[in-house]
Image (tube, helix red, strand yellow):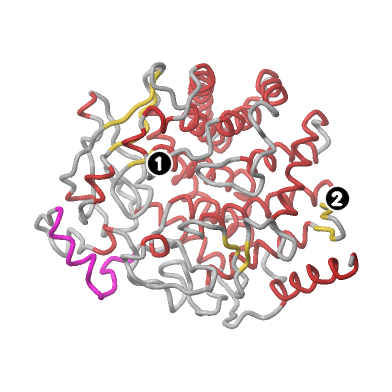
Amino acid sequence: MARKSLIFPVILLAVLLFSPPIHSAGHDYRDALRKSILFFEGQRSGKLPPDQRLKWRRDSALRDGSSAGVDLSGGYYDAGDNVKFGFPMAFTTTMLSWSIIDFGKTMGPELRNAVKAVKWGTDYLLKATAIPGVVFVQVGDAYSDHNCWERPEDMDTLRTVYKIDRAHPGSDVAGETAAALAAASIVFRKRDPAYSRRLLDRATRVFAFANRYRGAYSNSLYHAVCPFYCDFNGYQDELLWGAAWLHKASRKRAYREFIVKNEVILKAGDTINEFGWDNKHAGINVLISKEVLMGKAEYFESFKQNADGFICSILPGISHPQVQYSRGGLLVKTGGSNMQHVTSLSFLLLAYSNYLSHAKKVVPCGELTASPSLLRQIAKRQVDYILGDNPMGLSYMVGYGQKFPRRIHHRGSSVPSVSAHPSHIGCKEGSRYFLSPNPNPNLLVGAVVGGPNVTDAFPDSRPYFQQSEPTTYINAPLVGLLGYFSTHSSWR
């Protein structure tokens, strides 16, 4: 029986990694990288800069925050709607920063644009945290917004401002915001030292607030944030996540002691094969494990054990029941917008493979051994699937390749632009564009959609939002992956 259990995983690994895909082609990872960053310009809210490259977008939501007496213009729309959700926006900013920290040296001329994408997020997060003891976590009423189909330039829906404070805590969104500010401070440390210090100082303050006034923001703001970005996983992971990034950015002993003291209390080892805007467990363990693998932090050894467990839990053939692989080779988890799991988990595989390589280590997974090379191959297989090496021969990145989704669930992309249709298009007037069988008139270049299901099937249709809607947190980790493979892609 032991021999049979070894052979099956090896065969399945070989099938998924080394069998030629139904549609296979060499990929221009540099082009895909450029487009994956360009996507963020299509998601910008506020006053657009002179160097805006996606010209069909215009200024929008310039008065955000005015109802609360603050300036909350700027930031990103998270997906195909026009609400600014602080939780996924902060996670997006964290992952863009981590992409640059680990893979910026491989991005070539696109590094400059990646840094701009981070700063568009951090400039907004600084506004949202300007008042001590307060974090503005959302602008826009999701129910009102989702009842309309209109471009952001025409918004006439409620721009309600939602906040957390001492009496209405939100350690999850505040912890993630602290992580984003701390991670970005590393990005700007040499590029703009004054801005970097400002980010780190704010991260310190926001984390202290998150830790002192503990609670989930979806308890305080349930009717505003649920079910859209409800915290299903609890706030504990975001406190560890924020502390981990503050430790990395500041090297202060207090954060190291916080991590060690709270590892068990805040459940660092729970749900190890999850990583995304709601659940940071796998990311915490991989991030902290780097120090162990560099030989600098034996006191974090248990985080490395957790990280190893995460790696084993997503290997094809021996993966956890919560992780499947489609026949075409795509990693699949339950729920909508599957590509968010594909890009986030693949990012962790690639980051950990690099940490292991430097330490000359491997991950033991029972009778199998996961080498750094194997982890890179799995990550690359997922990236190639996104770019078109899949049973449908379809690139899931808009504007990349000859065949890609044309009817994505995205208001600005699907409604005629201001230049093409200067007059106002009201809330319900846009419905005919939503229901139209025609391709979207505006190409949201670089957008990666939610993607196919476990049968590798994909409906190129706006109403199927779980599969046809792009999000910022799908693209953010992909930036790092594409940066790496644009330089290291000679092997398959």
Quadrant for the C terminus in the image: bottom right
Residue 308 is situated, as x and y percent measured from the top left of the image, at 77, 47
Helix, strand or loop at label 2? It is loop
Residue 123 is situated, as x and y percent measured from the top left of the image, at 40, 34
Amino acid marked by disc 2: Lys
Determine the residue located farthest toward the front in the rendered image.
Answer: 1
Determine the residue located farthest toward the left in the rendered image.
Answer: 423
The main secondary structure of the magenta stretch is loop
Give the label, 1 or 2, closer to the camera: 2
Residue 120's disc number: 1
Residue drawn at x 82%, y 55% as measured from the top left: 365
Residue at the spot of label 2: 360
In the image, is residue 312 part of the stretch drawn in magenta?
no
Left or right, residue 317 beside residue 413: right
Residue 436 is situated, as x and y percent measured from the top left of the image, at 22, 72
Q: Point out the stretch of residues depicted in magenta.
A: 427-443
Query: Marks 1 and 2, Cα distance to the nearest angstrom?
Result: 37 Å
Q: Earlier in the sequence, mark 1 or mark 2?
A: 1
Residue drawn at x 39%, y 17% as measured from the top left: 167
Determine the residue located farthest toward the bottom in the rendered image.
Answer: 22
